Image (spheres, rainbow, N blue to C red):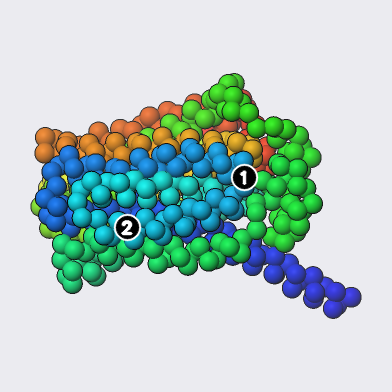
Amino acid sequence: MGSSRHSAGLTASGARFARSWTQRVVSLGEFMDGYDLLVIGAAMLFLKPYFGLSAAQVGWVSAIAFIGAAFGLVVFGDLSDRFGRRVIFIINLVCFVFTSIAAAFATNFWQLMVVRFLIGVAVGMDIPTSHAFLAEIAPRSRRGRVAGSLPNMMWLAGATVSVVLALSLGPVFGDETWRWLFGLASVPAVCVLVMRHMLPESPRWLLAHGRGQEAQQIFSLLELEPPSAKGRAQEPLSRRYRDLLRGPMLRRLLVVTAFFALQSFGGAIATVAGPIVLDSTGLGRQNILVFSLAGFVVGMFAVLGGAMIIDRVNRRAMGIWTCLGVFIAGLGIATVGRQSPSVLVLYFVLYSMLTWLGPGVLSWVWSVEAFPTQLRGLGSGIAQCVTRLAIALNVVLVPLLLPHFGLTTVLFYACAYLVCVALVAASPWLATTGRELELATVRDEARTPVRWARR
């Protein structure tokens, strides 16, 4: 009997390790997303003098990968629902490796635009696929942490590495540093490609496609609780696009898409557009990179702090209060940020911290909880598609607005968070803490009070 218990303990320990390993390998796609889409902010400090780019060209080179990602998100989000999460993982990484190397050898503005667009498409392939996969292998008691905090930690880690490399390589390679920043992205991509060959398919995707025996094996392998009978009854028997465009599902699509896009439109001030904003103050290239790095490190601590509470508190209340905090920080940048570099950086770091503590993570969680398994990749892909276009709009406008409005430009973007507050306050179904994934997708009309409470 003791031996049997010992064997069972080892089996349970092995299952937890397999689940943890799978979650981390899946989320590594966000490391590359964070690195590659954020490296442009640091690379632009070298690209601008190298190619003699105008303000408009700076905006378009910064934005084009987000436009490519928007395309990849919708097309491949749908394909991941049709053909499975695993096959899209492999395709996207192969594309990413080749386009990253190609970007390092661009010789003019238009070549750079083309390869950055293709890199964006490769990133867009991964995001809705990994996003859906993480939600589908997360225990309900840790879904916020796994589907929201974990990918954002990886995203910030990638962004941090991009700035560290820029700081390290800049003094050595000068204006050629951008080539190394783009090309080195292929190294982790190859490593992740090897690891993802060993991933299982999403058990919920298998279940939704009638492959119950295979699904049950993976639920057992990862020590996951399969959907309840009540949850299974809520899943559609077929995938129809029109289901996303009517009734409660359309309301969900509109709310999560608007929230995700608006918070990213405003939040890009603290990420990809951050170096451009700080550059307008005359801080100098090296100081800008150091301050950007500080913002990402603070963001990482904020995500870690958020991971401790996201599955314990009412997520709706968390979203409202943190969005209000970001708006106040943006107001501080615009009104008193001019007083001194230290005051500016203080508010800039606060803006970044609150963005990552709440809306930056919640948008990821809500945009997978809103949709059933057979439409999760597509629904999440649409939300992320509009989000990438919103970020692209941010980085196109920032270099054009800064010469006219200075730091007041930040306040324009911070106002997006006030709209986010209104969206969350009007959507009681966003209080999803602790609910089974399949049941979270159908909770729509219940009036849930906004309070800091468990579940």
Estimate the x, y position of residue 59 in percent, counting from the top left.
22, 42
Task: State the residue in front, 65 or 351.
Answer: 65
**Residue 148: assigned label:** none
Label 1 element class: helix
User: Could you say which disc has been placed on residue 102 in the image?
Assistant: 2
Q: Vertically, is 411 above or below 1?
A: above
- Residue at 74% over, 51% down: 215
Mark 1 highlights which residue?
A: 83
Where is the C terminus found, in terms of image quarters? top right
Is 455 placed above or below 258 here? Answer: below
* Quarter of the rendering containing residue 320: top left
The residue sitting at 23% across, 66% down in the picture is: 167
Residue visible at 45% across and 29% down?
423
Q: CA distance from mark 2 to mark 1?
A: 29 Å
How many residues crowd around disc 1 within 10 Å: few (fewer than 14), some, or many (20 or more)? few
Relative side of 340 to 367, left or right: left
- Mark 2 belongs to which amino acid? Ala
Of 239 and 277, the residue lying toward us? 239
Left or right of 357, for residue 89: right
Give the secondary structure at mark 2: helix
